[in-house]
Image: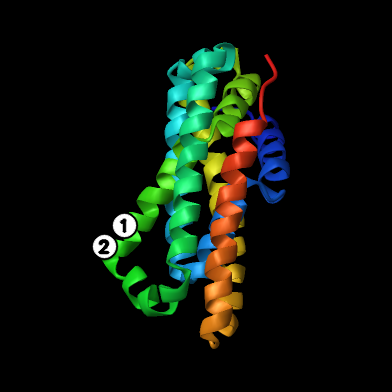
């Protein structure tokens, strides 16, 4: 069993990273503002599954490849960036009909689609993958053995904190949307703004990252 002080130190480091709004938070906020609280929470869930898959890959050794390979890192980055831009363009194109699709967006099938989109954003985020590859191993106690299991446990702690924090952001955004949705013009503006945020995140991802 990992020592309690080691777990608390990792939790503090994870919390410090998670509470600062980044691409995942902004993506969740954009979904919450455009489609409501349910959609925001579905996005959070999908993103969490995607990020935990990254953690599994890191625990199995794939993270080291991404950390050391510029080509693999760039591929992950471009896939994530392109997906965000596509989602942003779609949101802008459909902004005027947003008021008519809100109910449909909350149906089970639509919720699954939203979770899938959140999953793609989470699993294709190269920054978090490199973070996991660089940080998780530092908190593993080699004397205990079972390194993979320890990293998976640390990853669960990270995901639990992220679920709480991102859900809070999503609920706040969805609540604000309830007021904004009283006016179709406001709702269209929010749809366009959320699309612009996603496009901005995608473009920002292209032009930031490793310099090697």
Please say if 9 is above or below 165.
above
Q: CA distance from mark 1 to mark 2?
A: 5 Å
Going 43% across and 79% down the picture, which residue do you hit? 99
**Left or right: 10 as drawn, with respect to 49:** right
Residue closest to the eye, 32 or 194: 194
Q: Residue at x 59, y 69 (%)?
A: 173
Q: Position of residue 119 (x, y in %)?
A: 41, 45
Assess disc 2: are there few (<14), some (14-19) or many (≥20) residues with their C-alpha within 10 Å of its C-alpha: few
Identify the residue under disc 1: 112
Identified at 61% across, 36% down, the residue is: 205
Considering only vertical position in the picture, is 95 above or below 66?
below
- The residue identified by callout 2 is 109
Q: Decide if residue 167 is in sight here.
A: no
Label 1 residue SS:
helix
Query: What residue is rendered at 52% in x and 18% in y?
Result: 66
- Helix, strand or loop at disc 2? helix
Q: Whole-percent x and y of residue 24?
A: 57, 48
Q: Position of residue 182 (x, y in %)?
A: 54, 88
In the image, farthest residue toward the left: 109
**Circles 1 and 2: CB atoms closer than 8 Å:** yes
Pinpoint residue 52: horizontal percent, then vertical percent. 46, 37
Vertical arrangement, residue 207 with respect to residue 32, above or below: above
* Number of marks: 2
Quadrant location, the N terminus: top right
């Amino acid at each position: 069993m990992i020592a309690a002080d080691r777990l608390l130190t990792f939790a503090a480091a994870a919390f410090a990273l998670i509470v600062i709004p980044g691409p995942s938070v902004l993506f969740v906020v954009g979904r919450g503002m455009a489609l409501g609280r349910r959609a925001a929470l579905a996005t959070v869930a999908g993103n969490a599954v995607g990020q935990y898959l990254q953690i599994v890959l890191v625990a199995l050794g794939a993270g080291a490849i991404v950390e050391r390979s510029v080509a693999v890192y760039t591929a992950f980055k471009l896939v994530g960036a392109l997906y965000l831009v596509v989602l942003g363009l779609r949101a802008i194109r459909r902004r005027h009909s947003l008021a008519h699709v809100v109910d449909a967006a909350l149906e089970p099938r639509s919720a699954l689609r939203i979770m899938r989109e959140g999953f793609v954003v989470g699993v294709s985020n190269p920054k978090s993958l490199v973070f996991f590859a660089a940080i998780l191993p530092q908190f593993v106690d080699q004397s205990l053995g079972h390194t993979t299991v320890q990293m998976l446990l640390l990853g669960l702690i990270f995901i639990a904190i992220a679920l709480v924090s991102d859900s809070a952001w999503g609920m706040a955004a969805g609540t604000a949307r309830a007021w904004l949705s009283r006016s179709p013009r406001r709702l269209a503006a929010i749809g366009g703004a959320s699309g612009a945020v996603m496009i901005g995140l995608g473009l920002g991802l292209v032009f930031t990252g490793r310099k090697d």
